[in-house]
Amino acid sequence: MSTAVFRAMLLGLLRDRAALAMSFILPGLVFLIFAAIFSGATGEQLRLEVAVADGIRSSTSVRLIEALGREPSLRLIGDRDLTAERVRELVRRGTADVGLIFREGTSLESLGGFGPAPLILVSDPARGAAVPMLAGQVQRAYFSALPDVALGGVIELLENEFLELDDDQQRDVELGLADLREEAMEAVEQGRVSGWGFQELFEREDVAGRSARHNHVAYYAGAIAVLFLLFSAVHGAITLLEESESGLIDRILAGPGHMGVLINGKFLFLVAQGFMQIAVIFVLAWAIHGIDLPGHLLPWALTTLTASAAAAGMALVVATACRTRRQAQTLSNVAILILSALGGSMVPRFLMPDLLQQIGWITPNTWAIEAYTAIFWRDQAVGTLIVPWIVLAASAILGLVVARRLARRMEVL
Amino acid sequence: MGSPEVSARDSDDRPGNGAPVEVRNAHRRFGDRPALQGVDLRLRRAEIYGMLGPNGAGKTTLVRAICGRLALDSGSVRITGADPRREPTVRRQLGIVPQEIALYLELTVGENLEILGRLAGVARRDLAASVDSALRWTGLEDRRRDRVSTLSGGMQRRLNIAAGTLHGPEVLLLDEPTVGVDPAAREKIHELLRDLRDRGLAILLTTHDLEQAESLSDRIGILVNGRIRAEGSPESLVRSAFGDARELIVSLSLDPDDRGRAALQREGLTAAREDRIWTGALDGGFESLSELGRRLSESGLKVGEVRVREPGLRGVFFRTAGEELDE
């Protein structure tokens, strides 16, 4: 008899164009939008917009600004005659991500002393990450494009504190620094690193050999899939209340059928619907963004199956706990939005504070997203997926059992 | 249809096979409000039993108790001799036709019958024959592939009934089966119900439509405040309420005051609807009417119209349930 319920729901969905679009077109569309947004915000293509005011106006400050202008991750905005006040205003308005002021009356050459810092970073707290990024770039440019200045400063410091150079040594140093300056300026103009300079402290190495763009697509495929999975499951489960209002349940219960038959049939249908819905999103992620779906078909299928079952169980609990369709609609909207916000379907979990990340483990979204990212992002072994599968399957069974119990209220008045 | 052919009314008391439906001394309260206060009801095979009653009289509670979906505080319900709550399999003998169109509106006629047939317990091997038979019976064969939402109100009602009988029940419970249909469609539905009765089904028809109840029912019960106040064939009910008298209807132009109300009650009249329409029996000849009019006027009543007609079920109903009717 449950197959009859399954068939009724399937035919009902196929004849309802709005529900079909909501289940299979909208999620794909939203995923593509999110993937486009977040695959472009990985930091790889990010260019900081920097407003610079040169209050020092020395040859060194000009060289440093030129070197910064050649940094691919920075874009200097405005003209070269910006005042410090104008830089602050540009940052305040959001025209510039961060401002750099060369403080008037200071020098970049001298590293000793207790005077004020020669460089001021102007930041908007909302763009806090821009400050360390620019500071890092300035330091890098200082040591790579102005090695003569950095080294000169060190020698000056040594002379002041530890040793005294005689005239010959003094001359050799000056000649050496002049050569170094010439070579460094030539290198900057040619867009290469100076042949003499400070050794790079960092070398970058990416794990798993994939781009961040690819990983974010994998994350959002899972996140969007679970969000819409929950909405569609609830939409499907609420047909139970429609059937109650139309007298269909009275008709079925007058015969040998009971609520368990109805709940089982709906559960099976919702699992199948959820599976297909997630499949659409991941096929798009594979076809358009190159996620390796064929290479991970089995773990993906098991994750999708258990996630769909968990969503179906939860949706049926909502439908059976409520007395009216309107009540169920309101309750489910609130529940889904909260679960999705906590579970990482809206904002990536790795951007959340630790406490929220911990709370997220109570949501099906988190478990499903963790499983999908383990498969497609971190390329983890199947063993790490067992816990998410068990949790999702257990919540599906729990949901089904609770929904069947609650449905008894419709059966016996 | 596959329904059992049981035509002998006297077969109800065969050993081990009780009456299709037997309710004894049923009591049920919801909080402080009594819904059933000692209802006795026995449906016979091959009869249509019309259950009349004002809103809140207990009709829905009674039907739910018969279906085994509601526990009684005391009393008993038996379907063909078995308690539907203790032995749910006996519910297979029940078919239900709710007042709403309890169908999947976006599915076709055929799909609805197939799905509801399976849910009603029709075996897969018998399903095709049951569906074909139901389509022929309702005259919807050529609409088999049409969606239910595209059918006329009358066709939807016929399908609603057919869906409740696919599994061949012995008892059919119908709630307002002709709401919102035109007279021709209504007559067609009446034919279907008489046909089911002639095939041996016991049919419990709950309705507010007095003409329908009178023309269709073999017996009628009037349920008021959780009690069956009157029961019998339409003719016997009319006879016991009016005897050889005619039905008298007094319409007032203004609401009566307490003195006027007392005068109306002294004349044996009962408020039928609102406070301005009072009914009763006219025992004497027509000449007594002018005397009645004079007495009512003297009591301060503003009489708009006095009518006399052959008594019918309407009069019985208003006399029995009059004071409980909604405004």
Image: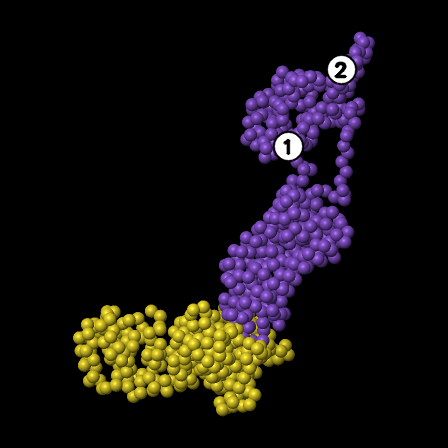
Q: Chain of mark 2?
A: A
Is B97 rendered above or below residue A316?
Answer: below
Is label 1 in a helix, a strand or a loop? helix
Please tell me which residue is depicted at 28% across the width and 86% down the height of the picture: B245
Left or right: residue B228 versus residue B80 is: left
Is label 2 in a helix, a strand or a loop? helix
Residue B262 image position (x, y, % from top left): 24, 75
Q: Amino acid at mark 2?
A: Glu
Distance between mark 1 and mark 2 Cα atoms: 36 Å
Whether residue B305 is visible: no
Q: Amino acid at mark 1?
A: Ala
Whether residue A347 is visible: yes
Question: Considering depth in this image, is A77 or A326 the residue closer to the camera?
Answer: A326
Chain B colour is: yellow
- The image quarter containing residue B14 is bottom right
Residue B178 image position (x, y, % from top left): 43, 75
Mark 2, Cα crowd under 10 Å, few <14 / some 14-19 / many 20+, is few
Is B248 rendered above or below residue A244?
Answer: below
Left or right: residue A168 versus residue A218 is: right
Question: Considering depth in this image, is A183 or A381 the residue closer to the camera?
Answer: A381
Q: Which residue is mark 1?
A: A130
Chain A colour is: purple
Q: Chain of mark 1?
A: A
Judged from this view, the residue extending furthest toward the top is A167
Task: Answer with mark 1 or mark 2, whichever residue precedes in sequence.
Answer: 1
Residue A114: which disc?
Answer: none
